[in-house]
Amino acid sequence: MLPNTWSVWSWKAFNQRKGQMAKLHFYYSAMNAGKSTALLQANHNYGERGMQTILLTAALDDRAGRGVIKSRIGIETQAVAFEKGDDLAEIVRAKAADQSIGCVLIDEAQFLTRKQVSELTDLVDHDGIPVLAYGLRTDFRGETFEGSQYLLAWADDIREIKAICSCGKKATMNARVNAAGKIERDGNQIEIGGNERYVSLCRKCFTYSEKVTI
Ligand SMILES: [Zn+2]
């Protein structure tokens, strides 16, 4: 029997089109810029169009409860908590086996490993699933996180969500401060549970200030 060339062609065209549409997006910002709010809004928009989404967040950030994405304006939703060793492509494919997935949304994407960012590119390029990752660009010393480093390197679309420094300029840095408001310059990269200890500042205030008002 002759193969049905039209259907073979259209299936290929569909997959190519699907592949072209899917992208890895990285929305980065300083702290308290409203990343989780933006993520939850995007999730809501997909839901309104009747599309299923998968939400992921870092297990180590359990300030709002394990696997909970909580915005500062009060909205929250349940997500899958990912650990450093988890295969994100496997997690998404297991869920996508029962339903068609419109997109994957990731909060606290700075905590992804290089391997996990690579898994996300595979979901985009191989499976045609768009991925929207939201995270901090830099830590309290001004160094990139591993997840941010590879998202900045490999994402198709990179956008900044803007935060404002107390001086009125755009805040791009995250200062860690002690109880007296003094900016700390050394310590471990990750210190969860002290959100109030971080202040987003412009680079000038971050570099030249010794103390900030919390
Ligand atoms: Zn400033």
Image (cartoon, grey):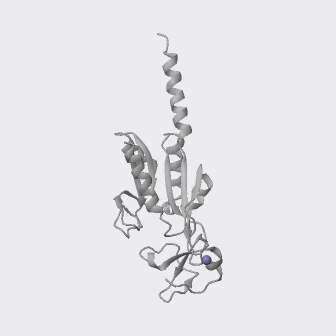
Count all numbered tags in the image, as a single digit: 0
Residue 21 placement (x, y as % from top left) = 54, 40
Residue nearer the viewer, 95 or 163: 163
Quarter residue 142 falls in? bottom right
Residue nearer the viewer, 84 or 130: 130
Q: Which residue is drawn at the image coordinates 50% and 77% (left, top)?
A: 198
Q: Which residue is drawn at the image coordinates 49% and 49% (left, top)?
A: 131
Please determine whether, in this image, residue 193 is positioned above or below residue 82.
below
In the orientation shown, which residue stands out farthest toward the front?
Answer: 168
Residue nearer the viewer, 70 or 44: 44
Q: Quadrant of ligand 1?
A: bottom right
Please determine whether, in this image, residue 49 is positioned above or below residue 37.
above
Residue 196 placement (x, y as % from top left) = 45, 78
Q: Which residue is drawn at the image coordinates 59% and 75% (left, top)?
A: 168
Please indicate, yes or no, whether residue 131 appears anywhere in the rendered image.
yes
Residue 185 placement (x, y as % from top left) = 59, 81
Please indicate, yes or no, whether residue 94 appears anywhere in the rendered image.
no
Residue 73 placement (x, y as % from top left) = 39, 67
In the orientation shown, which residue stands out farthest toward the top?
Answer: 1
Q: Which residue is drawn at the image coordinates 52% and 44% (left, top)?
A: 124
